[in-house]
């Protein structure tokens, strides 16, 4: 039996995160450089295996000073840990469109299991004959679980940043070739 390999079409995908600032608004960041592969036996992607990496140096929050701070040891420590990595441990179909993705997320050299909700949008053929599949992902992590502990207390006793980080992604996959499975 052969699996089908899919790759992330980065030009039509986005990987975002949101963190509460001063506990009143969300600041959105994104990784502009990332890649990933999916191997699936079936077109419904049930039991697919997924690998993903994002380049920490590509982080953007639309504020250069903040982006540079995020790359320091206070946060991602990009020189020592240049990638965020994810390797799936499960991809379970809940309904026609809804899945649960579990896997090992590694940030700053610390690996934790995470669970993400996934919505499958379907498979289509683009105008150039490529087969594409679409997914929306969302979930939450505690940044402190990954050694991202920087914070500050405000004059009123509040905190600068929430511990909770929302993860959001819109992913378009492009079908590649079939890959023979090891016996």
Image: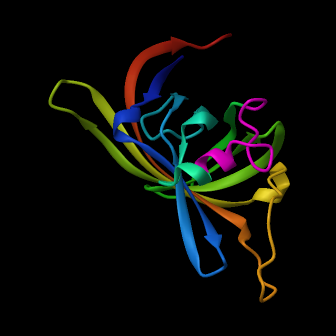
Q: Is residue 29 visible?
A: yes
Q: Position of residue 78 (x, y in %)?
A: 71, 35
Answer above or below: position of 84 versus 113.
above
Q: Position of residue 19 (x, y in %)?
A: 63, 65
**Residue occupying image coordinates x 45% and y 27%:** 7
Q: How is the image coloured?
A: rainbow
Q: Is residue 120 left or right of residue 19?
A: left
**Residue occupying image coordinates x 82% and y 86%:** 157
Q: Main secondary structure of the magenta part?
A: loop
Q: Is residue 181 left or right of residue 162?
A: left
Q: Nearer the viewer, residue 69 or 183?
A: 69
Task: Specify whether residue 96 is painted magenta.
Answer: no
**Residue occupying image coordinates x 67% and y 32%:** 83
Q: Give residue 89's quadrant in the image.
A: top right
Q: Give residue 8's quadrant in the image.
A: top left
Q: Nearer the viewer, residue 116 or 105?
A: 105
Q: Position of residue 137 (x, y in %)?
A: 52, 53
Answer above or below: position of 27 versus 134.
below
- Which residues, given as a range, are shown in magenta? 67-81
């Amino acid at each position: 039996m052969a699996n089908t390999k899919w790759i992330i079409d980065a030009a039509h995908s986005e990987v975002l995160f949101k963190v509460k600032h001063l506990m009143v608004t969300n600041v959105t960041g994104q990784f502009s450089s990332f890649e990933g592969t999916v191997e699936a036996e079936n077109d419904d992607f049930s039991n697919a295996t997924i690998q993903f990496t994002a380049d920490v140096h590509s982080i953007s929050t639309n504020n250069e000073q903040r982006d540079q701070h995020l790359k320091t040891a206070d946060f991602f420590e990009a020189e020592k840990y240049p990638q965020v990595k994810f390797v799936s441990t499960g991809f379970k179909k809940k309904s026609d469109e809804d899945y649960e993705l579990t896997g090992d997320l590694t940030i700053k050299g610390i690996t934790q299991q995470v669970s993400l909700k996934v919505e499958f949008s379907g498979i289509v053929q683009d105008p150039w004959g490529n087969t594409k599949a679409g997914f929306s992902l969302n979930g939450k992590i505690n940044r402190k679980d990954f050694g991202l502990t920087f914070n500050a207390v405000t004059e009123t006793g509040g905190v600068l940043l929430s511990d909770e980080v929302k993860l959001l992604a819109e992913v378009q996959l492009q079908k590649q070739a079939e890959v023979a499975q090891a016996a």
